[in-house]
Amino acid sequence: SQELEQSPQSLIVQEGKNLTINCTSSKTLYGLYWYKQKYGEGLIFLMMLQKGGEEKSHEKITAKLDEKKQQSSLHITASQPSHAGIYLCGADHTSGTYKYIFGTGTRLKVLA
Amino acid sequence: GAGVSQSPSNKVTEKGKDVELRCDPISGHTALYWYRQRLGQGLEFLIYFQGNSAPDKSGLPSDRFSAERTGESVSTLTIQRTQQEDSAVYLCASSLVRSSYNEQFFGPGTRLTVL
């Protein structure tokens, strides 16, 4: 089984709608990272969360970390076609190391 | 400014051939990482470099895989006697220091197809 589970696996929303993507870890989280991937462009760093209860926002994207639940959520408000892509969460399961474990990704499509 | 670059962007090869994938990290980044992403799957850690040494090679899937890095610059991932299961996107990333608390900057990847 995956150490990092993302849900949903894919999502299609109408432009302007809000949406949430979840990332659940089977192990203790020492750091949780959100990336966006577009074909041919590699991964784009969105946010890093380290402390339980931490919440960060960038433009219309907000991410929260629930350390107790070993879970993070990524929320997009008023989605736009530019938000389309694959959202990946990555986690550090061992304090202060370099190894990320990545989830399988959530493929987002936004209909104009 | 220049980001992480990888070449080639696409590589199609025949089973049994050797391939070399190149990664140019961001200048000044001491840490360099290689990942593999199979279709529909997440990223799989392969190897990590601190400078030109690779303290952890445990992610390499087999002895057909090897990687080198010249100083704190370019890295090459070599796959010998390629197999169809090697088909994937190979991603390289670099970061300022060896720490998971530093953002990793990713290259666009090399899409490898083994026929």
Image (cartoon, coloured by chain):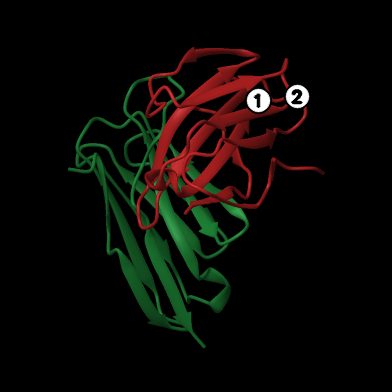
Chain colours: A green, B red
- Is B72 placed above or below A109 here? above
Question: In the rendered image, which quarter contains the N terminus of chain A?
Answer: top left
Of the two numbered discs 2 and 1 on the same chain, state the one appearing first in sequence. 2
Three-letter amino acid code at disc 1?
Answer: Leu
Image x and y of residue B40, in percent = 36, 57
The dot on residue B19 is none
User: Foreground: B41 or B9?
Assistant: B9
The dot on residue B96 is 1
* Badge 1: chain ID: B
- Is B75 placed above or below A108 here? above
Image x and y of residue B61, in percent = 37, 29
Name which residue lies at 37% across and 45% down.
Answer: B85
Judge the density around disc 1: few (<14), some (14-19), many (≥20) Cα neighbours within 10 Å: some
**Which quadrant holds residue B98?**
top right
Is there CB contact under 8 Å for labels 2 and 1? yes
Q: How many marks?
A: 2
- Is B9 placed above or below B80 here? below
Name which residue lies at 19% across and 42% down.
Answer: A69
Three-letter amino acid code at disc 2?
Answer: Gly
Q: Which residue is mark 2?
A: B28
